[in-house]
Image: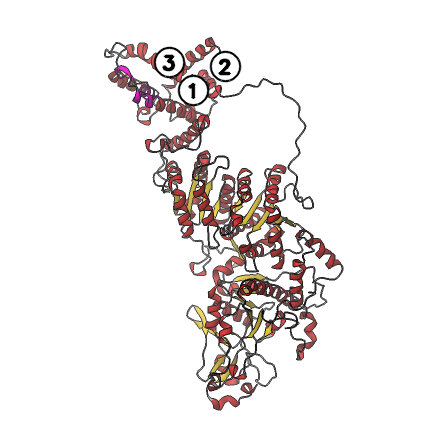
């Protein structure tokens, strides 16, 4: 925060602990209250990538093999929110053995629909089909108020929704 | 003024002419040759043509109606009603026009009596005794009516004098004088409409800056608006983007001067004023605001007062330019409508709209002509139509002489002007009547009538705008006549200015015709073009504001040959600028309450790049690429500081930037690297991890990490 200034909020390890009982510690500060009050939230959509979990790359999408297998048909992810088709829309896939710790899709939607916060989805500069679908899914899941991208990527994503669309020649 | 003898000669000639036209058929205007009707031609200044025949008939009808009113008060003796005789003999009403002259005479013989109150016994007697009196009385009325009009004219007594040419109004900003044919856009936004990158002003500038660049439009903005557009990262390098003084420094007067100068230097030049008014702010009530609107009306300049209306206006302007110029949509930001149109499910399909038409008295005839000219498309796109009572009455073919409306119509206009306007309106109504319209303007029920404008009709329209029931109002306003219900018109204006208003309000005939021409060109029939931008498509389809990265020639050229990487740099620069603007806008609100702004950041390279330079201790394999992004956030903050620098006037920003670019000092670096104090900004991780529900699985390597 040397340039932007401000205060970097930290939480006790239990806030992001995977053990449910640790997170239930009544003395532990949890981020939910801050998430509810966010004014600006940055997001980026990523395709599902099956990487070795010990690759050393801290990607949210680097999953254990069994989990990756079960999420292989997801459209993409924002953070650890895995997106799949829900009827005409897109929703979050849950797993019987694993759970997500972090801001939830519903919490992001509440921010978006509350009218006050700006949820910025930043993606683009790619021709990768999986990335385009991931971004389409993030938009379809009604996560963002603002989508920052380049023109070509914007066209590609829109055409996933309206394939017959064309530019004026 | 003709002499008494000359007048008598004209009257005699008129009698002869009237006798002749009694034998002609009004439904066959070609039969009227005015060289054979010299008395009428001279008195009414008629020349051959169908419209002129209609005008003659309308004048005669008007005289008959006026005479009829007089006869209601002072009953004629022995049933000798002149008004009836004129209508019957000359076939002025369609029922009589259908009969032969002999049959019409036969009717009068049965109703009229002689001056001695005796029955008229023969057609011959009627023709030689009564009929000349009937024509003579009408001829006298005609001459009197024309003299009443002519008598008001002033006679020139002085000799014409050669005068030096008057210079056109000076441009208020001499450094930014547009070319003669260059279009002009003036952007003004109240404070609430311009704060932050998601403001109405920023949205408008973001969507249409590419169009203004393509069309080489001169864009002026008042200082506050100018700076906010810069803050949103837009139009820095566009040389025809110029600042006018701030509102408190006479900016509205300068904007009005630009409107006047634009019209004086080239009356055909297209100028557009966007004033995003906040009805809750005092500036909406300033005399300068009313004056700007008034000058726009007088100079036929589009005056747009809300975001949605302005956006709809410019989308059509953009689409028309592409179609007319056959330019290949250079920016690639306009959508092509698929054959058969957009499907309903795409949310891009054209939706039926609701229209309100109204006109002040001086413009009622113009409104009727407008409705006539664009009837087909108004009906196609606006299945629901409303008008205030009197305007609706006229648009539905009602007569200006109907008793219920006689007092209301042209209430605001007095004297001879009123008579002239009545005649113009009656001509139109009569023309519609002759066509026996059963659809379109002039037919019963074409438009739904509300209450009279000055008795609550305008308020009813305001209600429909507030409820988003009506999305287009065409109100041909008269800028020259004060009215008792001006306050109610302001209520309508203010309803349309609310931030959530989706209504396009146009105030003058010229703007309405320009808009209707654009609609016709872009939306009708099988035209391929839809007036839809990529930005608007994203709003409709995904409900998201699209912010497109633009290359900025001010940034140092990269030797990076990877096109994707270069584009990504532009994206993160744009995102950083947007994020900083959003934090500042949120800060204005939060800090008033003593609360911090909260920024949520996730994992991932994108957030890392947008916040480039945040963490100098980053250690990973990509460390070598850091220089590409480390100044992104710094540049975004530097831009804000550059704009906020109080030593710089807005009008100097462009020049200062040019200087910085040429000196290699762009993007600017912030001198104060910590714009947010610890209590002002909280940066909150929103990071997600995946964990096993079953503890036994927590030994997995990912979980460990």
Is tag 2's residue or tag 1's residue first in the polypeptide sequence? Answer: 2
Q: Which residue occupies the foreground of this view, A123 or B192?
A: B192
Q: What stretch is highlighted in magenta?
A: B67-90
Give the percent coordinates (x, y) of residue B601. Answer: 57, 73
10 Å neighbourhood of mark 2: few (<14), some, or many (≥20)? few
Give the percent coordinates (x, y) of residue B364. Answer: 44, 35
Which secondary structure type mostly characterizes the magenta part of the structure? helix
Q: Is mark 1 on a helix, strand or loop?
A: helix
Q: Is residue B76 left or right of residue A117?
A: left
**Label 3 chain ID:** B
Disc 3 + disc 2, Cβ < 8 Å: no
Q: Which residue occupies the foreground of this view, B399 or B409?
A: B409
Disc 3 + disc 1, Cβ < 8 Å: no
State yes or no: residue B68 in magenta.
yes
Indicate how the structure is coloured in the image: secondary structure
Q: Distance between the residues labelled 2 and 1?
A: 13 Å
List the single residue furthest toward the right: B663
Q: How far apart are marks 3 and 2 (CA)?
A: 20 Å
Q: How far apart are marks 3 and 1 (CA)?
A: 14 Å
The numbered dot on residue B136 is: 3
**Label 2 chain ID:** B
- Residue under circle 1? B145
Q: Does residue B215 appear anywhere in the picture?
A: no
């Amino acid at each position: 925060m040397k340039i932007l200034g401000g205060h970097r909020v930290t939480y006790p390890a239990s806030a992001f602990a995977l053990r449910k009982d640790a997170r239930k510690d009544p003395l532990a500060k949890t981020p939910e209250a801050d998430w509810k009050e966010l004014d600006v939230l940055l997001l980026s959509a990523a395709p599902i990538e099956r990487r070795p979990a010990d690759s050393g790359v801290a990607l949210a999408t680097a999953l254990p093999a069994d989990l990756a297998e079960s999420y292989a048909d997801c459209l993409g992810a924002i953070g650890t929110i895995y997106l799949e088709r829900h009827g005409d829309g897109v929703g979050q896939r849950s797993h019987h053995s694993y759970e997500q710790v972090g801001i939830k899709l519903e919490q992001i939607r509440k921010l978006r629909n509350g009218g006050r916060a700006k949820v910025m989805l930043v993606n683009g500069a790619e021709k990768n089909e999986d990335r385009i679908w991931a971004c389409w899914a993030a938009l379809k899941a009604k996560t963002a108020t603002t989508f920052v991208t380049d023109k070509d990527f914007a066209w590609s994503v829109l055409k996933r929704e309206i394939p017959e669309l064309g530019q004026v020649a | 003024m003709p002499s008494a003898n000359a007048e008598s000669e004209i009257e005699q000639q008129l009698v002869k002419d009237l006798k002749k036209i009694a034998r002609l058929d009004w439904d066959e205007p070609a039969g009227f040759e005015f060289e054979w009707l010299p008395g009428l031609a001279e008195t009414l200044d008629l020349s051959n043509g169908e419209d002129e025949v209609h005008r003659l008939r309308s004048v005669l009808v008007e005289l008959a109606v006026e005479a009829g009113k007089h006869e209601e008060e002072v009953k004629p003796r022995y049933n000798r009603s002149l008004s009836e005789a004129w209508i019957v003999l000359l076939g002025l009403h369609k029922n009589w026009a259908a009969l032969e002259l002999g049959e019409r005479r036969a009717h009068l013989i049965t109703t009229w009596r002689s001056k001695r109150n005796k029955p008229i016994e023969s057609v011959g007697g009627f023709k030689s005794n009564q009929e000349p009196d009937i024509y003579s009385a009408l001829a006298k009325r005609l001459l009197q009516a024309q003299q009443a009009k002519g008598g008001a004219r002033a006679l020139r007594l002085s000799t014409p004098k050669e005068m030096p040419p008057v210079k056109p109004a000076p441009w208020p900003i001499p450094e930014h004088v547009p070319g003669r044919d260059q279009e002009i856009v003036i952007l003004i936004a109240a404070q609430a409409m311009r704060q932050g990158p998601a403001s109405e002003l920023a949205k408008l500038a973001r969507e249409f800056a590419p169009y203004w660049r393509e069309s080489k439009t001169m864009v002026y903005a008042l200082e506050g608006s100018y700076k906010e557009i810069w803050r949103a990262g837009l139009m820095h390098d566009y040389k025809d983007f110029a600042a006018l003084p701030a509102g408190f420094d006479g900016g509205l007067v300068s904007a009005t001067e630009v409107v006047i100068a634009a019209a004086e230097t080239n009356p055909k030049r297209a100028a557009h004023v966007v004033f995003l008014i906040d009805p809750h702010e005092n500036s909406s009530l300033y005399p300068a605001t009313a004056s700007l609107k008034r000058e726009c009306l007088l100079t036929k300049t589009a005056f747009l007062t809300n975001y949605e209306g302005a956006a709809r206006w410019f989308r059509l302007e953009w689409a028309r330019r592409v179609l007319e110029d056959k330019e290949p949509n250079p920016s690639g930001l306009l959508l092509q409508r698929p054959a058969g149109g957009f499907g309903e499910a795409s949310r891009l399909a054209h939706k039926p709209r609701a229209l309100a038409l109204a006109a002040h008295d001086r413009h009622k005839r113009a409104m009727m002509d407008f409705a006539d000219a664009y009837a087909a498309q108004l009906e196609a796109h606006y299945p629901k139509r409303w008008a205030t009572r009197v305007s609706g009455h006229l648009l539905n073919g009602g007569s200006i002489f109907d008793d219920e409306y006689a007092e209301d119509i042209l209430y605001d206009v007095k004297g001879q002007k009123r008579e002239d306007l009545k005649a113009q309106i009656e001509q139109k109504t009569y023309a519609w009547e002759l066509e026996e319209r059963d659809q379109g303007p002039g037919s019963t029920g074409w438009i739904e009538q509300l209450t009279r404008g000055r008795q609550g009709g305008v308020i009813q329209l305001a209600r429909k705008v507030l409820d988003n029931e009506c999305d287009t109002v065409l109100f041909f306003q008269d800028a020259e006549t004060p009215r008792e219900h001006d306050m109610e018109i302001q209520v309508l204006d203010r309803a349309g200015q609310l931030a959530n208003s989706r209504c396009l309000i146009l105030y003058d005939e010229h703007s309405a015709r320009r808009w209707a021409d654009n609609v016709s060109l872009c939306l009708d029939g099988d035209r391929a073009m839809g007036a839809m931008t990529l930005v608007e498509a994203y709003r409709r389809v995904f409900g998201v504001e699209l912010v497109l990265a633009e290359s900025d020639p001010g940034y140092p050229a990269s030797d990076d040959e990877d096109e994707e990487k270069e584009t990504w740099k532009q994206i993160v620069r744009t995102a950083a600028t947007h994020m900083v603007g959003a934090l500042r806008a949120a800060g204005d609100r939060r800090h008033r309450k003593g609360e911090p702004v909260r920024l949520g950041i996730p994992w991932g390279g994108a957030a890392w790049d947008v916040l480039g330079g945040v963490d100098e201790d980053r250690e990973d394999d990509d460390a070598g690429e850091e220089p590409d992004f480390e100044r992104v956030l710094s540049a975004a903050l530097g831009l804000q500081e550059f704009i906020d620098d109080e030593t710089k006037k807005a009008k100097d920003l462009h020049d200062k930037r040019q200087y910085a670019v040429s000196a290699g000092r762009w993007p600017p670096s912030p001198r104060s690297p910590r714009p947010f104090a610890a209590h002002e900004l909280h940066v909150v991780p929103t990071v997600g991890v995946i964990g096993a529900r079953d503890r036994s699985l927590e030994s997995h390597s990912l979980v460990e990490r």
